[in-house]
Image (cartoon, rainbow, N blue to C red):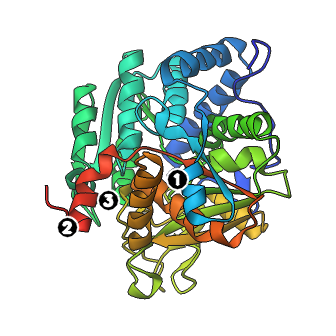
Amino acid sequence: MTNNTPYIPANTADVPDARGYYGDYGGRFVPETLIPALDELTTAYDSALADPAFQARLAALQATYTGRPTPITYAERLSEHLGGARIYLKREDLAHTGAHKINNALGQALLAQRMGKRRIVAETGAGQHGVATATASALLGLECHVYMGSVDIARQRPNVFRMKLLGADVIPVDSGSKTLKDAINEAIRDWVTNVRTTYYLLGSALGPHPYPLMVRDFQSVIGIEARAQMLDQVGRLPDVCIACVGGGSNAIGLFHAFRDDDNVDLIGVEAGGRGIASGEHAARFADPDIGRPGVLHGTRSFVLQDTDGQIKNTHSVSAGLDYASVGPEHAHLRHMERAYYTLATDEEALNAFQVLSQQEGIIPALESAHAVAEAIKRAPTMPPDSIILVNLSGRGDKDLDTVIKELGVEQ
């Protein structure tokens, strides 16, 4: 990007509207005490986008600290192994901290600094957002507190140590399912209590407006880069873009640049867990019996809930996809039939984890392996001149303990 080009383009979509709605989804469903804080955040974000100095600083840090642009990689051996479509990978696993989460964390941390908020609270599931937030906080000299479900702490020990090494206070959450949903609950409680001095650095494209908008914008660099790289290196756009969807930040970051390209299919992959029939999954769109519109964590979207509106427990082998709702823009894209959503089970994700490792020498995050699993299913059904672009949202070092346990591998 040139010095005259904003790092985050403004007015790149007709959604959300001024109230933060993406069609029927989004909005603000929060205690009255948080409305002034959200108004303050919206004003500060709009001001930052219009400030060339903020844009230039973010662009410089993403280039010299995060390591952007991340490349696209032609997965030649995987493509030959599967037959059919050629598969390309957008390599967010090569960004600093090992995942796409740093894009948003760095942008929001700069915004917090601009607002004079020196104390950061965040939630994390797989730990990558927590690591990214702790990293950005260390870089900018901010106080950092990360809430994390005790179940996720047990299965993401390397990331817990990384956060502590970076100076963050990691706070275990033992309520509810002890996973991402409950970590968000506690982070919001902290923010409500300390709203004057604290910035809530939300990690995914959900929550009350303006968070889904901000996270999408900070992650949109993924799709902007990938689109330009495909045209430059391959000579055309992909036929299909695939990304995993928990809250949905890496997927919306990829999809946003392609939303007006009607010849590009957008596919989000949810966590199928142990299968829909088992009830142990996090597939909000795939299970019509319990996945339906509702409100969770300040926004209206699709939510896994029982007939009384109580939030259902979820399951996924990947901590980052183990969430009962999904970002409101994804619900809107599905409603508009611009994006389509499928699922990969734990078994399929674990298989994809191994296949990509063995075919390409790239160990994906278990979250990303869900997207790879969809490519493995889809590629053989497509003509050989077609192209699939998979967002490899993170690397799999953090998941090795989980995979060893799941596969019963002797150490």
Q: CA distance from mark 2 to mark 1?
A: 44 Å
Is label 2 in a helix, a strand or a loop? loop
Which residue is under mark 2?
408
The label number, if any, that marks residue 179 in the structure image: 3
Q: How many discs appear?
A: 3
Mark 1 vs mark 3, CA separation in Å: 21 Å
Q: Nearer the viewer, residue 78 or 187?
A: 78
On residue 319, the disc is: none
Residue 205 in sight in this render:
no
- Residue type of the residue flagged with mark 1: Val
x then y, percent, for residue 400: 27, 51
Circle 2: residue type? Gly
Q: Which tag, 2 or 1, sits closer to the chain's start?
A: 1
Q: Which residue is mark 1?
A: 30
Give neighbour class at mark 1: few <14, some 14-19, many 20+ (Cα, 10 Å): some
Q: Nearer the viewer, residue 235 or 224?
A: 235
Q: Earlier in the sequence, mark 2 or mark 3?
A: 3
Q: Hey, what amino acid is under mark 3? A: Thr
Viewed as shown, does residue 159 lie left or right of 371? left
Residue at position x 81%, y 36% in the image: 11
The reply to whether callout 2 and callout 1 are in contact (CB within 8 Å) is: no
